[in-house]
Image (cartoon, coloured by chain):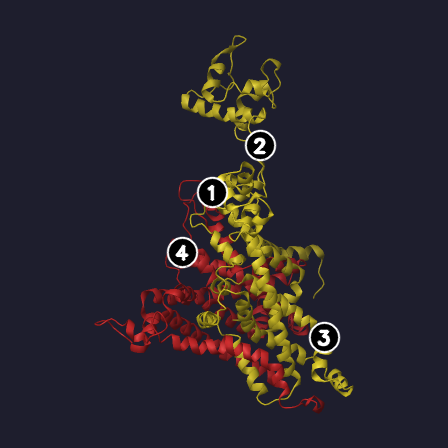
Amino acid sequence: MKPFSGLNHILRNLPIHLALIIMCLLWILPTLGLFVTSFRSREAVRTSGWWTIFQREQQPGRAEYETYCASCHGPQGDALAEADLSDPALIAKYPRANRLLPVLKQEVNGMPHLSNPALPENPKDALDTLTSIVTYLQTLSGESEQTARLTLRNYADALVGYKGTQDYITDCEQGTASALTKFHCNASDLLNPEGMGRAFVNTLIVAIPSTILPIFFAALAAYAFAWMDFKGRQWLFAVLVGLQIVPLQAALVPIARLYVSLDMADTFLGIWLFHTGFGLPYAIYLMRNFIGSLPREMFEAAYIDGANHWLVFLRVVLPLSLPAIASLGIFQFLWVWNDFLVAKVFLPTHPVLTVQVTNLIDPRGGNWHILTSAAFLSFIIPMIVFFAFQRYFVRGLLAGSVKG
Amino acid sequence: MLPTITRQGRLVPWLYLAPALVIMLIFIVFPVFNTISLSLKDKTGTRSAEVSCVAGEPCWGKFENYRYALTHPEMTQALRNNALWLLLMVPGTVIVGLLFALLADRVPYESLAKSIIFMPMAISFVGAGVIWRFVYHIESGGGKQIGLLNALLLKLGANPVAFLSNPAINNYALMVVGVWLWAGFCMTVLSAAIKGLPSDVLEAARVDGTNEWQLFWRIILPMIAPTLLVVTTTMVINVLKIFDIVFVMTGGNFGTEVIANRMFKLIVTDTGRSMAITVLLIVLTIPMMLFNVYRFRLQERER
């Protein structure tokens, strides 16, 4: 590149930085919304947008209080000893605006209580203003309970699959009947079939063998494709490349029927084998390309030393293939973890995370606080895997084409 | 081409291949043929599809389910929508991905920017559907707009919009989600291609006074054309099979039906029709399959 001065460089690249940063913000905003919402209380989610938590906390009635009262009573309400507005006992006498109004109509030391500014002429406006002030006075005197801005209770609700009107912890504390019929209010609730905790366990049970099995079988086949001589090798491999594209929808019904006749419907074994089947073409393709690129001299040396194929496969090929196995493993793991369709069809009574999340969707949007935390629970493992092993994931993506 | 010492008995390779081949035969090859034969059967998958013909109405005999798959309004809508997805989302995703790849190549925080764009690929389509349902949420009962987009519209003085149930825009709203999901994939693959360009060619062009705009159109674009083709075919396959997003966000209602969702809805209630739709899906992917094999053979020749 041509030499340039630093400032010139920055100025010339300014539009690029701006465009990229704006696009990145746009990309991250939807996920951020979900993340923030998952920590907000049901009431907060219902009544305000998630972005309001980044705004300065607006206490209701504060503006009105500052306009009408703060000049004499002070910002904390305790400036006048004879009328200490921060005293709960005093404030308790005026729970509503119409109780406060007569006091304000009385003169103080021969002057109107409120003169600069006076209350609005219109009685309705005056009462509205006073309602706000009453609310603020209650906050000031500590009467109204400060609700926590952020909460973890949504996650508890999502984990146990709570569907009531309050939240799981509150229900358990109060011993609400509906909670006690469905929950035991101890750790065993984490395995409640309607909850995300159970779905998490189910997903792990599905994902781990569904990742290991195809990779092992693929490594075996890939070794044969790469270093053995047999008739139809090229031809068979070309078919395999074509098989990568077969949409897995093609197998749903035939395999479901097969499983019913074999009494394997709704079993983990069934879903492991299905994921293995559809993971194999891509896995063999990727592994064969990798194993085929290992140096030939190494194999020759091993064979001359008297090693047979099985020994070479176990002692040389598998250890050296670890980078490819890592790429493939992460790819397949994320694929299986995020799968919805296969799990929905083959594991109806052991819902995995994705299926459980769709079970929680309320068409009217009444449970965003639980739905968002449930969705986030399903993201935790893939996010960790993705950010920890991004390099391998990308490599797996670049090495091949697509999968069914 | 193989060293003679790796020669072995005729049976040995097949021992290594057998587990994979058997599993693929059972789970991929057999189902494809089974699907074809089931597509000629009725609702229950037992009798010929002819039995569902009604006297006095058009009937395609054994291929009655294909009459449904190709002419029924439910399906023509789904086919139209899939075509719309192909037409808009595929180029949209590829262009956005390319733009990211080009921009990110020029900044020091490249890997961070790429991680952000690529992140949606790590989460499930179901999760992405939930994320975007929340963005598009409309509060119709007169409450506060808690969905990001409708709150923004309100702030700008416009009326809230029912992004997911208004047939005039809901398909586009879903495609935005698709672009959000897959742009990272396109970016990653294209970015690798751009980085793989020989730097001396780019240097020489810059020294010759080519500006960045010309550099892109005359040199970078032609040189990454093969990769663009690969990314595009991959996206075509993804879009043909598009399912989870639609299932989670609209369930295929309000005019957003797509082929794969139609197929899923009929799995239990009407095996014959569901399988006919699946065959249609397989047929649509065949060109991509042939292209993939062709590309593979080309690569092999270069090895």
Query: Residue under circle 4?
Result: B169
Q: Amino acid at mark 2?
A: Gln
| Residue B210 visible here | no
In the picture, which chain is yellow? Answer: A
Name the element at disc 1.
helix
Circle 2/circle 3 CB separation < 8 Å = no
- The kind of residue on which mark 4 rests is Ile
- Numbered mark located on residue A247 in the image: none
| Helix, strand or loop at mark 4 | loop
* Residue closest to the far left: B56
Q: According to the image, label 2 marks what residue?
A: A146
Specify the label residue B155 is tagged with: 1
* B238 w.r.t. A373: above or below: below
Q: CA distance from mark 4 to mark 2?
A: 42 Å
Q: Is residue A127 left or right of residue A169?
A: left
* Numbered disc 2: secondary structure: loop
Q: Are marks 1 and 4 in contact (CB under 8 Å)?
A: no
Q: Nearer the viewer, residue B93 or A137?
A: A137
Marks 4 & 2 on one chain: no
> Mark on residue A320?
3
Marks 1 and 4, the one that precedes in the sequence: 1
Instruction: Return the residue found at the far top.
Output: A110
Is label 3 or label 4 in front?
A: 3
Whole-number angstrom distance, CA of label 3 to CA of label 1: 59 Å
Q: Which chain is red?
A: B
Marks 1 and 4 sit apart, C-alpha to C-alpha, by 21 Å
Categorize mark 1 by other alpha carbons within 10 Å: few (<14), some (14-19), many (20+): few
Q: Are marks 3 and 1 on the same chain?
A: no
Task: Give the number of the mark in front: 4 or 2.
Answer: 2
